[in-house]
Every structure is written in C-alpha cells, then in structure tokens.
Amino acid sequence: MSEKVSKYREMTQRYGDPWIWGIYLTLVVLSVVESYSASSRDVAMLGVYEPIIKQVKYLVIGAVFLVGLSRVNYNNKLLLLVLIPLLWIFTMVALIYVMVAGEVVNGAQRSFTIPIISLSVQPSELAKLSAVTALAYIMATNQEDRDVSTKGVVISAALVALFGALMIQSGLTNTLLLMAISAAMFVVGGARFKKLLVVLIVYGIVGGLFWVWKDLSEKREENMRQVTAIQENKAAGVDKSKIVDRHGMRKDRIYNWLHRDELIHDSINSQNSQEMFSIIAQAHGGLWGVGIGNSRECSRLPLAFSDYIFSIIVEEIGLVGGIFVIILYLWLLSRAAMIARRCHRVLPALLIIGMASMITFQALFHMAINTGVFPVSGEPLPLISKGGTSIIVNSIAIGVMLSVSRTIANHSNGKNKDDGQQLPSGLDARNPSEIPVKNEWKN
C-alpha cells in the first residue's frame, strides 16, 4: 500500500471522507463571501456587519451538528430508533401547523418562529431530511432478493406523496425535489426498472390530478371570496391581502417560462423582475466575472441573497466560476455514489446517496431556475444561500455522509468485518448495488 493511500485511509477512518470535507469547506467559504456580496439591501437597512454575522451564526450552528454527527456511527441505535423517529414526528406536526397558522414569507405560508430563541423554522427543509431517513428505513426493511419489495415501493411512494401534499403550500418545487430524491434512492436500493417506471407514472398521474383539483378549487374559492371576504376579515382580524394565491402564481410562472423568449421585448415590471435581472446579472458576468463584491445587479435583483444567489455568483466570478460551483455539487454526489457502492449493507448506502441527492438535486433545481431552464420558484442554493433552516439541514446531511464514510472505512480496515452486524434486526439487508473491490479505499 502506498504512503498516499495509507494516509488517505487513515484520514477517512478518523474524520470521514477528505473529499467531502473539502467540498463542504469550499461551499462554506463561498457562502460567507457570496451571501454577503448579495446582501446589499440588508446592508443598507441593517448595517455593514449584520448580514454576515447572521450567515456565520447559522454556519457555525450547522458546523456543530456536522462535527457531532460525523463522530457518531451511522448504525448507532439511539440515532436510528429514537432521534430519527422523533424528527419524523416533529416534522409532520410542524408541516401541519404551518399549513394552518404559518407565517407568510414571500407570498407563501412556509415558516414559524420559535419564540424564546427567535429562530425561524421552515418545516419544508426539515421534511427533506425526514423523508430521506424514512425512505432509507423503509427500503432497508423491505429488501427481497436484492430488490425493494412491492410492499416497500408502495409504502415509499405513499410517504413521498404524504410529504409532498404537506409541503405543497410552501412551494411545488419541494414536492418535485422529493420525487427526484426518492427515484435516486430507489435505484440504489435495487428497485427493478419496471417498479421504478410505475412509481414515476403514478407520481405524474397524482400530480396531474392535484393540479386539476386545485384549479377547480381555486375558481370556487374565488367566487366565495368575493362574497364573504369583508365579513371574514372583520370577524377574524386577518389581512387576506398578505396571502398570495400560490396556484394562480404557479400558472403565471409556467406561462412566462413557456414564453421566455418574449422577455427581450418586455419592459421590466413586478411580474418579471426576477427573471429579467437574473438574465442581466449572468450576462454582465461574462466568462470571468466582474470580481468579488462588484456585483451591479445585487441591489436590483429580488432575493439575490437566497433564491437567486447563483446569478450573483455568475456575475461576480463568471461562467467559469458558475461551472466550478456546479462541479462541486456533482462531485459531492459522485463521492457519495462511490462510498455507497462499497457499503456491505443497504442502509448506509441509502443514507449517503439520499443525503447527497438532497443537496445536489436542490442545487441543480436552484441553478435551473436561475438560468431559465425551470419556471420561477423559491429554492435556496445549499449551504450558500442566506437562510437558517436550510443551512442547518444541509450541514446535518453532510454530517451523516461523513459518519457513513468514516464508519465504513473503519469496518473495512478489519476492526469490524461486517458493517451491518451492529444494525437493529430488519435493517441489516445486503446492499444490492455493492461492488466488491480489493482496495475499497484506494484514492
């Protein structure tokens, strides 16, 4: 064994995969620099240091979770049988609460504030983490001849539908993201192509039926609103004007997306300002960008520090910098795939690929929205966009990935011949996507 390979293995056994650490630290640096650069509006209102202090605060909280989880073996029974189920329960309750009494943020009920610590929580971010862990649990306990059983497929699809229905109020993109994550986990879990195709078809049918139902409901509600709006507002003391009709907004956004080429002939207004200034920012950046801190459009582009931060990145460090950011997220997914193929048991493979898919697919969705490939929707860039819940959740996901890589590396070293022997009964199914190799941790 060469000295380089020996050092790499030693680092992985002690801290987790070094490449994942490198990607995480690079994203943190980009987060501090670009989120501050894109926060010109907050700087004008809150002062020079307040935006960067808030971002660093959430990054530090996320780092604490990341380091703590990276030191805990993924097969810890307290984690698998107590903490993860508690997360599922909390997420479900939070999603239901937000649907009923959530705070309106950017036109949608998507968050609530914990009073004592004044921390704003977006349950839709927690739902992604909960869904990944729940799907990993379900698929691991429903293995049949190196395949996800029909029962496991049905339960998994139903879970995605449930989470999707609870998150639909906070944005359709999150539901589509969950479907993409579950598809990746089905593949790693060994689901046969026919089963996967059936699941995708069912997703499409359910989504279409929901859209039709929502359209009909919207028309009925609009008629009722015109008659009872004044009385309801006076009785409940609620300002209905603050709640935006999400379904009507989605239809407008999809229409604008389908007619995107016509934007060049339109003047900038409140309906198309995000798309227009996003295009302008990316065009202004060119190949090499205008330099860090020299963004011109950050003061005009709505939500430049969160939903449209990739446009600011391209403006400041150019097309080359944008491609570099894309490679970082794809690299994270590729490292997860490599580790997943070397897991003897399916549970760690599902956990690491699920966490990596959650981060990478969300990043790709964000970039697709910014560049006009997808219709306009609110989706933060993982670990870079400004925001508390998103940063903490994605830090936890990285921590789980490091935990799996570290635990598997130690098991492969001979300290434990089988990484599934400590798993609770029913979670120790073999990994159908495993590729045995002589040197599992050769760099």
Image (tube, grey):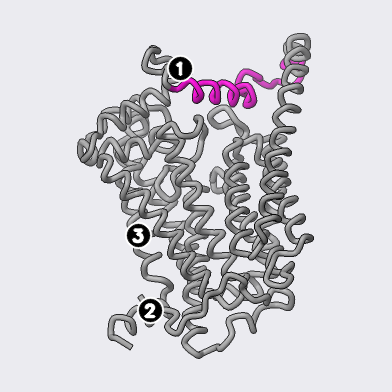
The kind of residue on which mark 2 rests is Lys
Magenta highlight range:
232-260
Q: Nearer the viewer, residue 52 or 4?
A: 4
Residue 300 place in picture, x, y as percent: 34, 24
Mark 1 crowdedness (10 Å alpha carbons): few <14, some 14-19, many ≥20: few
Mark 2 crowdedness (10 Å alpha carbons): few <14, some 14-19, many ≥20: few
**Label 2 vs 3, first from the N-terminus:** 3
Residue at the (73%, 78%) spot, across then down = 425
Residue 392 place in picture, x, y as percent: 50, 54
Residue at the (69%, 43%) spot, across then down = 203
Residue that numbered label 2 is attached to: 442
Query: Seen in the image, is 216 located left or right of residue 261?
Result: right
Count up the numbered dots: 3
Q: Main secondary structure of the magenta part?
A: helix
Query: Considering the image in quadrants, where does the C terminus appear?
Result: bottom left
388 over 438 or under it: above or below: above
The kind of residue on which mark 1 rests is Ser
Residue that numbered label 3 is attached to: 25
Separation of marks 2 and 1 at Cα, in angstroms: 54 Å
Query: Seen in the image, is 212 located left or right of residue 268?
Result: right
Q: Quadrant of residue 295?
A: top left
Q: Quadrant of residue 248?
A: top right
Residue that numbered label 1 is attached to: 270
Mark 2, secondary structure of its residue: loop
